[in-house]
Image (cartoon, rainbow, N blue to C red):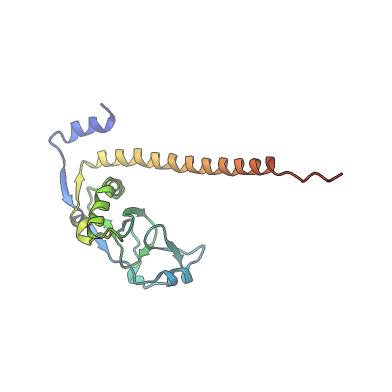
Amino acid sequence: MNKIEKLLQTLCPDGVEFRPLKDLGVRNKGTSITASKMKELHLDNGSIRIFAGGQTIADVAEGAIPEKDVIRVPSIIVKSRGHIGFTYYHKPFSHKSELWSYSINTPELNQKFVYYFLLTKIDYLQSVAQATSVKLPQLSIRDTDDLLIPLPPLEIQEAIVAILDRFTELEAELEAELEARKKQYEYYRDRLLTFEARNAS
């Protein structure tokens, strides 16, 4: 029996409560902005990040978008179109208005725990989105609002988050190491396979 299983057995032998995601905090609407405007406003050192679909982001200056659209608390962004996914972000941000995000404010919940739990629902939500439209899968707000989130004791949530945060760090370190090795390999490969033409005698 691992640490988490022992905690579950000790602290909640009768199971845990579940609540709809919509009841656990605030759902944020984002900002009305086009992809071209995001590109125009982007700054390398912009202090506010704007999220769009997929991996598209723009970092912009304070005042570049209405203050009412800036979210300044840690939140979970829902990637609701195409490839469904979630992003946890803890710095000032916004997102295109067709996306939405949740800022969890329930005292007995660790927001990172909710984020990691939502990651386990991506395959299910992708199938829900595809049922709406195969060409461009699309979630509705209700699809995430009504998701049931477990509420184990905070001690268990924090233990799970600590383990998964460490795995995430290790994964990032491995990817960085692999990228460095790839570049090193390409450098030596290119040097070894570069030949000068022999002069004709």
How many discs mark residues in the rendered view? Answer: 0
Q: Can you give x and y, in whole percent of width and height, for residue 118 in the image?
A: 27, 49
Q: Can you give x and y, in whole percent of width and height, for residue 30 in the image?
A: 32, 66
Q: Which residue is nearer to you in this view: 199 or 24?
A: 199
Residue 189 seen by the camera = yes
Q: Residue furthest right?
A: 201
Specify the quadrant that holds the C terminus.
top right
Where residue 47 sits, quadrant-wise, is bottom left
Residue 110 seen by the camera = no
Q: Is residue 166 above or below residue 149?
A: above
Left or right of 188? Residue 169 is left
Q: Is residue 147 above or below residue 175?
A: below
Q: Residue furthest top?
A: 1
Q: Residue furthest left?
A: 14
Q: Is residue 50 above or below residue 177?
A: below
Q: Residue at x 84, y 46 (%)?
A: 200
Q: Which residue is nearer to you in this view: 164 or 97?
A: 97
Q: Residue at x 20, y 45 (%)?
A: 150
Where residue 4 sits, quadrant-wise, is top left
Q: Can you give x and y, in whole percent of width and height, for residue 120 in the image?
A: 28, 45
Specify the quadrant that holds the N terminus.
top left
Q: Residue at x 68, y 42 (%)?
A: 193
Q: Can you give x and y, in whole percent of width and height, for residue 198 in the image?
A: 80, 44
Q: Which residue is nearer to you in this view: 85 or 49?
A: 85
